[in-house]
Amino acid sequence: MTSDGLYYKSSMASTFAGRLAGGGGVEVDSGSLTLAGSNTYSGGTTVQAGTLVLANPAGAALGTGSLLINSGTVDATAYPQTVGSLTVYEAGSLNLWIGRTLTSIGSVSLSGTLNLFNLGSLSSGTTELMTYSSETGAFSSYTALPSGYHLNYGATELDIVKNAVASFSGSGVWMATGISGTAAWNNSTNWQDGNNLNGVPGTTPSRAADTATFNGSDTAATTIVLDATPSLTALSFSTSSYTLSGGSLTLNPGSGTAIVLDASGTQTTTVSTANVTVTSGTQTIASTIMLSGAVSIAPAAGSQLTITGNVGEATSGQALVLTDGGTLVLTGTANTYTGGTYAEQGTLYFQNSGAIYDGSSLIIGAGGTIIFDPQMTGSALSHSFATGAVAPVPEPGTMVLLLAAIWSAVACHRFSKRRQNRISV
């Protein structure tokens, strides 16, 4: 090859297996030229039309210069090859073989067509097609990939990547519409996440922040049987009357926060909480509830949540906090959480003395109301007041304790179940 380079134009196919050196370049204008030698020329390679086949086993068919594909095709399927830089224009085509990487020492600018061969050898993860120092553009078209694969233009390489298998996120929305009667929690077809994937929230230990939403899509009152032991950070209800029945439910600290008394009972502290939200309707949890952290219960004004199951705790000192203007009814006969019960807002209604653990705190905020059912069953209650004043106001069938604020309008009451000193109306 002279210093001016090699110009190829032919209606035939030719192979050049010798060594091309010097400062000139190679240009292909028609026909088919195969370069099989180990070349060192530095003037670059341009394909204006026709086909250039790169067939050097050592990957040095193009020397050290740039490769420009204006039109026509460069076939780099025989062996892995190296180029100085690469530009593929809109009318150009590049043929690559899966498993034989094309390496560009410099940058690449991509457009045109990418033809892929040996697709049957794709890995189940990432398959490298091309490496480079930097990249701009993208192929306008390319050979159809098998289902579940896509091209990935990375910072330093072009890959074929097998799509990650989408899995249920753990944020489940109840989708079993039109049910009148009972349905099973542990049925994946009853749930969908935001990606429309089915799964059961709260049943996969590796997911630490599952949530469950009952959004009122049912047309009648529905009982959901806990035939699993879900573990959730958030639970929400709206519109329809839902009942969670049987089994047990674990509530874990999530994104909520609440201010509660510390272990000494004299100072406040902020803790993370699980969130139970009721935006409308009358909802019921008849299952056992286990607290692995504090829980914030937020029934909106006009809505109600009744907890008939017993509420326990996985570790000592967990609190239950009423944080919205609706009604929370506690009817459990043996609640054992020890961190106290707080009514920051709304109405907290006790139907059984067993709903308050012996010796635990009852704290009522300025916006909270406490009601004790006079027909309350179980042991009697006695009380002592840490701060504040209490004015019992009798009403037909109820006794309402309204607290006057001294500092933060919060009064702390410690209730102990005793068989003497029964509170009466």
Image: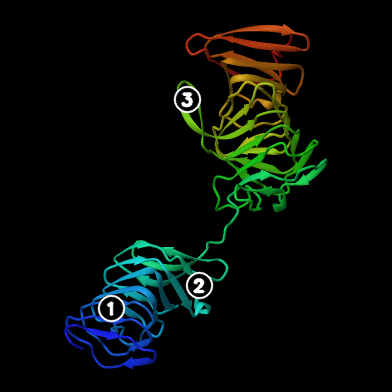
Q: Nearer the viewer, residue 406 or 232?
A: 232
Q: Which residue is mark 3?
A: 264
Disc nearer the start of the sequence (2/1): 1
Q: Nearer the viewer, residue 281 or 327?
A: 281
Q: Quadrant of residue 285?
A: top right
Q: Residues within 10 Å of mark 1 (few under 14, many from 20)?
A: many
Residue 153 drawn at (x, y percent): 40, 63
The amino acid type of the residue labelled 2 equals: Thr
Disc nearer the start of the sequence (3/2): 2
Q: Residues within 10 Å of mark 3 (few under 14, many from 20)?
A: few
Residue 88 drawn at (x, y percent): 36, 70
Disc nearest the viewer among 3 and 1: 1
Q: CA–CA distance between discs 2 and 1?
A: 25 Å
Residue 405 drawn at (x, y percent): 53, 9
Residue at image location 61% in from the left, 45% down from the top: 231
Q: Which residue is mark 1?
A: 45
Q: Nearer the viewer, residue 214 or 347?
A: 214
Q: CA–CA distance between discs 3 and 2?
A: 70 Å
Q: Residues within 10 Å of mark 2 (few under 14, many from 20)?
A: few
Disc nearest the viewer among 2 and 1: 1
Q: CA–CA distance between discs 3 and 1?
A: 81 Å
The amino acid type of the residue labelled 3 equals: Ser
Q: Which residue is mark 2?
A: 143
In the rendered view, does 248 fall on the left or right side of 100? right
Disc nearer the start of the sequence (3/1): 1
In this rendering, is residue 425 above or below 147? above
Identify the secondary structure beneath mark 2. loop
Disc nearest the viewer among 3 and 2: 2
